[in-house]
Amino acid sequence: MTAHNRRSSAAASSRTAGGILGACCLLIAGLQSAFAAELPQYAEYVHQGVASCASSVCHGSATERTGTNVLQNEFVTWTRLDGHSRAYQTLLTEASQRIARNLGLPNAHEAAICLDCHADNVPEERRGADFQISDGVGCEACHGGAENWLSSHAARGTRHQDNLDRGMYPTSNVEKRAELCLSCHLGTADKFATHRIMGAGHPRLAFELSTFSALQPPHWAFDADYDERKGIVDEFDTWTRGLLVAARKNIELLQGPLLHGNGMFPEIALFDCHSCHQPMSELNWEPTVLTRGLEPGAVRLNNANFALLLPLAEVLGGPLHDQLLHRIRGLNLSAARSRESVATASRQLALSVDELEAAIARGAGPSERQRILNGVLFRAARGDYRDYVAAEQAAMAMDVLLISIERWDDFKERMDAIYATVENDEAFRPQSFAAAVERLRRAL
Ligand code: HEC
Ligand code: HEC
Ligand code: HEC
Ligand code: HEC
């Protein structure tokens, strides 16, 4: 995790002030059609281009408007503060040129494998008159091609559901939002930052929905009017539901073509980078709770998307916790056996994830959230998250949980101290992380 991708005090407190409103279980009408939505890149609609959203009377206002449903300065936020507006420019940098050279590509900014995640790479026939690939990850890369809703979506009386019916992507639905973000921040079978791409110089990917939404930063306001139109999902539910989607998507990757590719190893980027990339002098090998049973020297799978399910299951799932732990371990052990056993073990794990989802859907009150936080802190202080990717997820989880029990303001310095220990994966010391967590635990 790098300095800029740590949730800043400013971002978190403005969210608290914005009233991380109480749990809201409003089921938006038309959930059915929301679930059917295809990712914007693949749905049938023409993308009109960022210019068609950016007029000053639409989303290009210099400042937030009051008295309207939406802020109207979304374009300015996106251009000035949101990395997605620079995603294409990144492909023109020296770093990207080097990656392209290493991969034997003529350049990065015309290579589909780069554009698929760094721009709104829809085929030519779905690019409208104002569409520009150089806009990077533009409005329609997330909100869907505006062909059928551009002219109607701001009209009086248009409801959110009308927009969805006309092809707007349901970013307001947490599961669909997570799926969208993860399509680029984790990857899919169709677009994936393979170890070949990483080896050529691409940074490691990590994601957590609540934290990354704060970091984007938001160009929306979860206020009363939003709640009425779309239903606010609070921080805690955004975190848990994002975790479930990430676990599922990771499991899909473990069953798909990336696992069955050629070569000695299945796709190496499905494994924990640091299980291979660490200095040999370190000699701190020891199985973690999740990898118990693995032999010294085994290459570990990336457990980032599974590790935090356990403290949730402990509080909300009762006996499910032990089954889940058993299956995560089973998956880790399977990677040392064969691809077939990875496929089998991940199918088993998927069943536990389904059960956990049902348990989480029953809801978690303040005391349960507090116990989940205690569970994360206890595990972290005990050393369960010795693997960097798990520590990184655990730090983000603590942050979200402190916000969700309204204690974030009291502990932000201690939270900063924890983040400092996961700032740089190459300098990560599990002992320092555990010690920083123990200090927060005592203070709580
Ligand atoms: C079409 C692909 C794509 C989608 C969809 C996408 N992202 Fe991104 N995101 C990127 C790329 C590429 C970058 C890196 C931009 C750059 O610096 O060049 C990025 C950067 C970010 C960053 C900045 C990270 C950092 O280290 O500073 C955040 C935060 C982020 N995305 C959050 C999200 C969230 C939240 C969603 C879902 C609502 C999302 N992204 C959806 C491709 C995508
Ligand atoms: C699966 C989606 C995906 C693919 C494929 C992909 N990237 Fe990225 N890339 C991302 C995301 C997401 C980030 C931001 C990571 C973060 O900060 O968390 C990123 C970050 C980067 C960065 C670092 C940007 C910065 O601001 O530090 C470079 C450089 C880069 N990508 C170049 C490339 C090139 C060149 C290709 C093609 C060979 C490529 N990427 C393919 C998703 C992808
Ligand atoms: C990386 C993904 C992403 C990109 C790029 C993006 N958005 Fe959004 N947008 C979201 C998410 C997530 C939300 C919050 C969930 C929701 O209400 O749909 C949102 C919400 C909105 C809202 C609704 C706010 C409300 O109160 O209902 C508007 C308007 C909006 N975006 C406009 C834009 C415009 C204009 C652009 C381009 C300049 C843009 N967005 C680019 C992800 C994105
Ligand atoms: C199975 C072990 C293994 C795993 C897991 C692994 N790598 Fe590698 N990686 C290697 C090997 C082997 C090389 C080639 C080293 C060499 O040529 O000296 C390499 C090379 C690299 C390089 C180029 C280093 C250089 O010397 O230029 C980068 C960057 C890299 N890996 C990043 C990653 C990232 C990011 C991950 C996790 C997503 C990852 N690796 C996971 C084994 C692994």
Image (tube, rainbow, N blue to C red):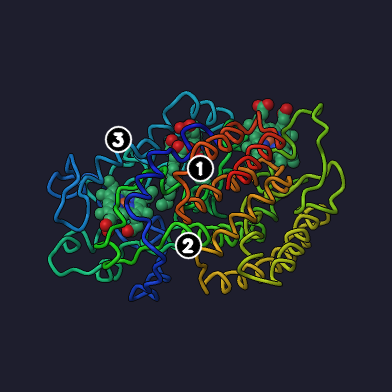
| Residue at x 50%, y 57% (from the top left corner) | 239
Looking at the rendered structure, which numbered label has been put on residue 145?
none
> What residue would you read off at disc 3?
80
Amino acid type for the residue under numbered disc 2: Asp
Most foreground residue, 118 or 440: 440
Label 1 or label 3, whichever lies nearer to me, is 1
| Residue at x 74%, y 66% (from the top left corner) | 322
Is residue 65 toward the left or the right of residue 177 in the image? left
Q: CA distance from mark 1 to mark 3?
A: 30 Å
Residue count near mark 2 (Cα–Cα under 10 Å), binned few <14, some 14–19, many ≥20: many
Is residue 386 toward the left or the right of residue 8 in the image? right
> What residue would you read off at disc 2?
237
Answer yes or no: is residue 266 visible. yes
> What residue would you read off at disc 1?
411
Determine the residue located farthest toward the front in the rendered image. 443
Most foreground residue, 159 or 410: 410
The secondary structure type at the circle numbered 2 is: helix
Residue 228 percent location from the top left of the image: 27, 68
| Residue at x 41%, y 46% (from the top left corner) | 214
Q: Of callouts 1 and 2, which one flags the residue occurring earlier in the amino acid sequence?
A: 2
Residue 72 percent location from the top left of the image: 20, 49
> Height in image: 128 above or below 85?
below
> Height in image: 305 above or below 388?
below
Asked whether mark 3 and ligand 3 are closer than 8 Å, the reply comes as no
Is residue 444 toward the left or the right of residue 379 in the image? left
Q: CA distance from mark 3 to mark 2?
A: 29 Å
Label 1 or label 2, whichever lies nearer to me, is 1
Q: CA distance from mark 1 to mark 2?
A: 21 Å
> Height in image: 104 above or below 389?
above
The secondary structure type at the circle numbered 1 is: helix
